[in-house]
Amino acid sequence: MIRIIPAIDIIDGKCVRLAYGDFSQKVVYDESPAEVAKKFEDAGIKRLHMVDLDGAKQGKVVNFKVLEEVASKTNLVIDFGGGIKTSEDITLALDNGAHMISTGSIAFKNRDLLKEWLKIFGAEKIIVAADTKNEKIAVSGWQEETSINIYDCIQSLLEDGVKQVICTDISKDGSLAGPAKDLYKKILQRYPTLHLIASGGISSLQDIEDVDHIGCKEVIVGKAIYEGRIALNELTRFTL
């Protein structure tokens, strides 16, 4: 059974969502990420995906105090990303309550550093966000496209010892248009043992069931919850 991971994206300490990774298309859903996280936990959710969008844009961790508050008020298993560039940033995130960190840019810009992190912190602590547009990797808060093919990327990551990958098709993110099912099928056909986390476009319980059937281990859900497309009590079947 696939595991649900609600997303909390943070700008200025508030819970927001973007459309297609565009900072100009921002909607503030709640002033208190900690209160949102508590509602997730009360619904039986065990995991949480937190992204420091200020950090992603500025290239340094900004909202670690929000992470600390969420971690202190819930027992959720949190992966935290956005602006993590150094080993010290990872330590800061872990010390403030994150159980794992998610990183994108560094994995593709500095492969040696990623290998160092895997050695220091362990593969269970490092999730790589392989975000794509037209099957090419995008980095720096999706503001910079690369020429790196998603399939070659995953091959390299596996060779380096990465175990978990979040894959977001940017064209789907915040769109409620359905997940990138064909992309996930292609990835898992090539790499069937990969712990693939689907992200982007989820709009219904059927979408969740679809990515479960494809073989994704976990799925990140954001806007569909905040917009009321999926009620928290409907997620109980996935929280066992």
Image (spheres, rainbow, N blue to C red):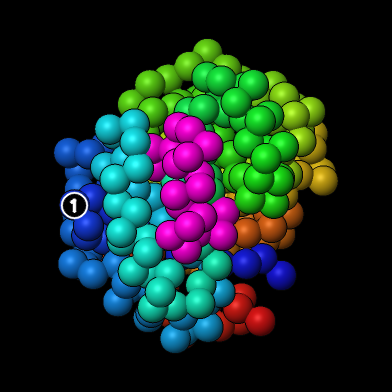
86 within the magenta span: yes
Q: Residue at x 34, y 48 (%)?
A: 52
99 within the magenta span: yes
Picture coordinates of residue 180, whole percent (x, y): 55, 43
**What's the magenta region?**
82-100
Residue with the most extreme right position: 193
| Towards the viewer: 181 or 139 | 139
Question: Which quarter of the picture shows residue 161?
Answer: top right
Identified by mark 1, the residue type is: Asp
Residue bearing mark 1: 12
Q: Element at badge 1?
A: loop
Q: Residue at x 45, y 41 (%)?
A: 89
Q: In which quadrant is the N terminus drawn?
A: bottom right
Picture coordinates of residue 198, whole percent (x, y): 57, 50
Q: Residue at x 50, y 77 (%)?
A: 75
Q: In which quadrant is the C terminus drawn?
A: bottom right
Question: Which quarter of the picture shows residue 22?
Answer: top left
Query: Quick one: label 1, few (<14), some, or many (20+) residues within 10 Å?
Result: few
Question: Which quarter of the picture shows residue 31?
Answer: bottom left
Residue 171 seen in render: no
User: 161 above or below 175?
Assistant: above
Residue 92 seen in render: yes
Picture coordinates of residue 100, whole percent (x, y): 57, 54
Q: Residue at x 22, y 60 (%)?
A: 14
| Towards the viewer: 31 or 239 | 31
